[in-house]
Amino acid sequence: MSDPVTFETFEVEVYLPEVDVAIVEPAVAAVAVAGPTGFTGATGAQGDTGPTGATGATGPTGAVGNTGAVGPTGAQGNTGAQGNTGATGAVGLTGATGNTGAQGDTGPTGATGATGSTGAQGIQGTAGATGATGATGATGATGATGSTGATGAAGEVTLAGIQTLTNKTLTLPKVNQILDTSGNAVLLFAPVAGAVNHFQMNNGVSGGNLSLYAVGTDANIPINIVTKGSAPVKANNVDVVTVSGTQSLTNKTLTSPKIDTVRDTNGNIILNTSPQASAVNWASVVNSATGNAPAIAAQGGDTNVSLNLISKGTGTVQVNGVPVVTTTGTQSLSNKTISGASNTLTNIPVSAVSATGTASAATYLRGDGVWSAVTGTLVPCAAATTGSETYTITSGTVTQINGTTIDGYSPSVGDRIVVAHAPTSSGSPGWWAQGTNPANGIYTVTSLSGGNMAVSRAADMSGSVNPAGLTVWVRNGSNWAASMFMVTASGSPHTWGTSGLYMLSFLGQSPHFSGIYADSIFLFGGGQQDRLTSNGASSGDKTFFLPAAESSDLTLLAKSVVSVTSTVTFGSAPGNEYVYLLKSGAVPTLPTAVGNKAFYRIKNTTGSSITLSSAGGTIDGSSTLSIGAGVVVGIVSDGTNYFVI
């Protein structure tokens, strides 16, 4: 008896894919709304099923492995008629699966035997081709329509009906507007041909934000919110600030804004900024606390940053409505006090000085604001030559003095120097070799370079000035400190560089005459002439004698030195030389000049001018004399008025 054949039963589940159905509302004209549709009638009886199409050939089934102790299965022969099913033997071990034999022709199906125990599942054979689908049977007749039932809670959605949908998910709907519960438009959608960009709205979790995004195929998509007419866009019921709109901002803090123009409430420009390439410096406006001033400060990366205020055209930079004084601008100053102790004024034109009289090379400006002829005592000099110097002389004028010291003093640029020992040409004249050479005079140091002094003639000893009779004091030097020089000159008018000029010196230590070459000296005073005669020596120093018969008319001066710190009237003893040193607080007055035979030497030791008054008679034609800081003057009387020498 052959082994029984076991058939297995398989259940097959067929799944249909879910399909999204788009509900499209076509644009149609409004029509009358039909009443609700009743329930669908019962489906008619199923029509007869058409004949089944022929079954396609079954693919070959793989050979079944040996069962139990069964030996190898031979080649599959034609399937014989189905025999009776015998008892099931014990299941042996499953052998290795043999190769699938060729599929034999399927014999007629025998009667189904009793189902034996399910054997091990064999390998799935290759599925055969699907047979052709049989023809569809005829559709059964439609059953009669049932009567219209009552309207249900939710009828079907119609194309034109006004209906309220609940719990619906609309996939890819086409919507042109959204209405509120009163039927008024809340949101309209306007289609744009070829649109590729759109909005995306995101909801938010607790504490999060709601978001509105611009999305689409473009890399950069702006969002444009357009109002109607001139109405503004608002956020939280407050106008939104736009890039180019004219708007007033309140309670805003702008951090590092880029501003080119600031305007007033009328729209006019108040402040305009001009950008500079690679700028690292800027102006900072600083406010202040009570009692302090606000400031405009220069700031930036540089260590030292200037602040440049530039006016337009010929306009001026002003403070409190008054133009600011600049270092190079041509400006008229008024109501200014300039301290001479810490300021130096240069290149001031004579025309800018407010004074009476005529300014010229032959006049000087007095302390009382009067241009006066250059007479009497000139402005003191810093030093005087001794004859040991080496000179460079061009056209009768000294242009350079070798070295940087004069009589032990080191002059500065601008100092005045007495040249009393100039030779006739460039070179060195020799110690104390005073003469009448044209190059003598008063010079000003113009530069100190290369170990030498460049000099030029002083204004009050050049040009049209006739120097005859002028005197000048010397302030410094080992030999000439506190000495005076008096000029004797030839030629009227005097020609500088050609006319002879002699500088007669008076040493400050005593009324000593230096450089007088004569056999007789005549002294005038007391209404007669007194003569000093020499010993007639032909060489060496000469000795002068005063005749005894005439000595009563010649009185040597007695000298007294007084420091003045308060109001004082000078002494007037005949034949006395008075030396007064004016100090802080001094208010000096000369006694009457009438019959006065005293000699006065006065020095202002303070840093400011002091006014000298006269109790009787004038001083060089004026009622007072202003003595500048550090100035020394000598004063004598002609019996009626005083004169400065």
Image (cartoon, rainbow, N blue to C red):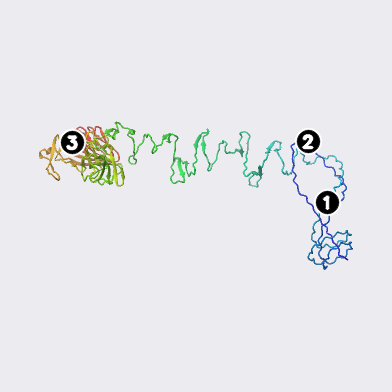
Earlier in the chain: of badge 2 and badge 3, it is: 2
Closer to the camera in the image, 558 or 19: 19
Density class for disc 1 (Cα within 10 Å; few <14, some 14-19, many ≥20) is: few
- Residue named by callout 2: 33
Question: Under tag 3, what secondary structure?
Answer: loop
| Rendered position, 8 above or below 644 | below
Question: Under tag 2, what secondary structure?
Answer: loop
**Looking at the image, do the residues carrying marks 1 and 2 touch, with CB atoms under 8 Å apart?**
no
- Residue named by callout 3: 597
Residue 167: % across, % down: 74, 44
Residue 199: % across, % down: 66, 42
Q: Amino acid at mark 2?
A: Val
**Looking at the image, do the residues carrying marks 2 and 3 touch, with CB atoms under 8 Å apart?**
no
Residue 419 seen from this side: yes
Point 74% across, 46% down: residue:
20
- Looking at the image, the residue that sits furthest to the top is 357
